[in-house]
Image (cartoon, rainbow, N blue to C red):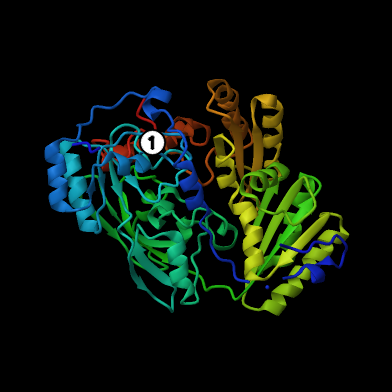
Amino acid sequence: MSYFGLKVVTSRKFWDAAKMVYPRCGQIASLLSYRFMSQAKEPPLTAERYQVSRLPYSEVSVDDVRYFQKIIPGRVVTEEGELKVHNIDWLRTVRGHSKVLLKPQTTEEVSQILKYCNERGLAVTPQGGNTSLVGGSVPVFDEILISTALMDQVISFDDVSGALVCQAGCVLESLNQYLGERSYTMPLDLGAKGSCHIGGNLATNAGGLRLLRYGSLRGTVLGLEAVLPDGSILNCLNSLRKDNTGYDLKQLFIGSEGTLGIITALSIICPRKPSAVNVALLGCEDFSRVLQVFTLCRDQLGEILSACEFMDSESMRIVQKHLKLINPLPDNAFYVLVETSGSCGKHDEEKLDIFLEKAMDAGFVTSGTVATDQGKIMSLWALRERITEALAHDGYVYKYDLSMPVEKLYALVEEIRTRLGSSAQCVVGYGHLGDGNLHLNITAKSHSDALMSALEPFVYEWTSKHSGSISAEHGLGFKKRDHIYYSKSRGAVHIMQQIKRMLDPKGIMNPYKTIPPTD
């Protein structure tokens, strides 16, 4: 139909016995999960579940479709079957009913499309890999979908400076493979690397697993190109490490979630690929020991520390139950995954050995295993990276992406377990110790208004009370837009609204998301 296997020991000397050697490689768990979820029952329409009223945008006509076909012949999708997967988020929690999907290949094509939509008053939703966890990449009503999937070309790479220039539709894992062949790596790493687009990563200011080592995208992105709602092209696509001339306009678009324009290309500084990588998975009796491990690894590993992640016993149980992954350690209340990466294997190994022995001697860890072999490292990382996928198999997921002082990270999880009791199927806490980022997830058999009322605004109030942020790296999207005031003052939001009105006076860019309407 168309519209129009690891060895584990628990003694002080277990590290030599447990070692195995490899550079970490990606996995496509998000795609596997996506295929599984695509067979599940459709969620209700977002507008109906959340009782949202459609704003007075124009509706797509046959003439509109004909115009788009002239601009991008053969790349206008109106078939209901093909549109279905683009109208639903991969968690299957929100659903729109767009009737048109456009697939431009160039910045100029995006410019023509947005200029026309702005003149006609047609709302649009930019979409990359559709891996948003807050409903930011699917329409709420019938907004026109503009996909960056065909904008997937590397424009240039400087093998001296490490500056990569590429289109916004490049898949993160593909970029990492491209760079790996040139002895470089991306400064960003996510569990959804096999399907997320780099432009979407910028638009949401994605954090990920390497932020501890390489910092955020606000620091690694050198420049970008974006198309504004009226079709004009903003060219800030330079590759300079230093450029102190006027306002840094690229920062407006990093984290804007497609509400100010569409990022079409970018320049990003990439580090050299480490030649020596080690991963340790450690078991801890309680969260206080998790914090002690984190403090010790920063002190002992210093410049070679590239990741420090934690997960609780429920996280481990979920990946074992739904994905049949193997936990190489005895059961523990918590697990800490530590990764080192550097240029001298012997040096890194010696530092890691000292850290591990001190952690064991101090009683911070009860058991552990170390991997330096590629296959073994991949197995250990899968236990952490595929938690989101496993949760999607457990039922409806209430997801919270929070940042707060690291010592408070797990207190909220414990309070939520007590607060919800048996009304929740599972309460899981895991995240990035290195940047104080908690991923709190609650599963239930299906969506429940009563359960939602027990969670919100309690979670946001608790986070705000403890000087945290209600969105550490996922963005606000549709689901969290109206909760922005828990993390930003009304004065700050007012300035954001003014910027939005200035760049997008007709409000066509990704409406109903990120920034609340003016009071």
Q: Which quarter of the image is occupied by the C terminus?
A: top left
Q: Position of residue 268 (x, y in %)?
A: 42, 64
- On screen, 452 above or below 509? above
432 or 161, which lies in front?
A: 432
Q: Which quarter of the image is occupied by the N terminus?
A: top left
Q: Which residue in the rendered view is the most extreme toward the top?
A: 450
Residue 50 seen in the current view: no
Q: Image point 23% across, 31% down: which residue?
A: 57
Q: Quadrant of residue 247?
A: bottom left
The residue carrying pointer 1 sits among few (fewer than 14), some (14 to 19) or many (20 or more) residues within 10 Å by Cα, namely: many
Residue 18 seen in the current view: yes
Q: Position of residue 53 (x, y in %)?
A: 33, 23
Numbered label tally:
1
**Which residue is denoted by mark 1 in the rendering?**
513
Q: Is residue 164 left or right of residue 115?
A: right
Q: Position of residue 4 (x, y in %)?
A: 18, 36
- On screen, 265 above or below 161? above
Q: Image point 35% across, 36% down: which residue?
A: 497
Q: Position of residue 334 (x, y in %)?
A: 74, 47
Q: Is residue 372 left or right of residue 96?
A: right
- On screen, 60 above or below 455? below
Q: Image point 50% across, 60% down: which residue?
A: 188
- Asked which secondary structure carries label 1, the reply is loop
Q: Is residue 100 left or right of residue 137?
A: left
124 or 303, which lies in front?
A: 124
The type of residue carrying mark 1 is Lys
Q: Image point 88% across, 61% down: which residue?
A: 361
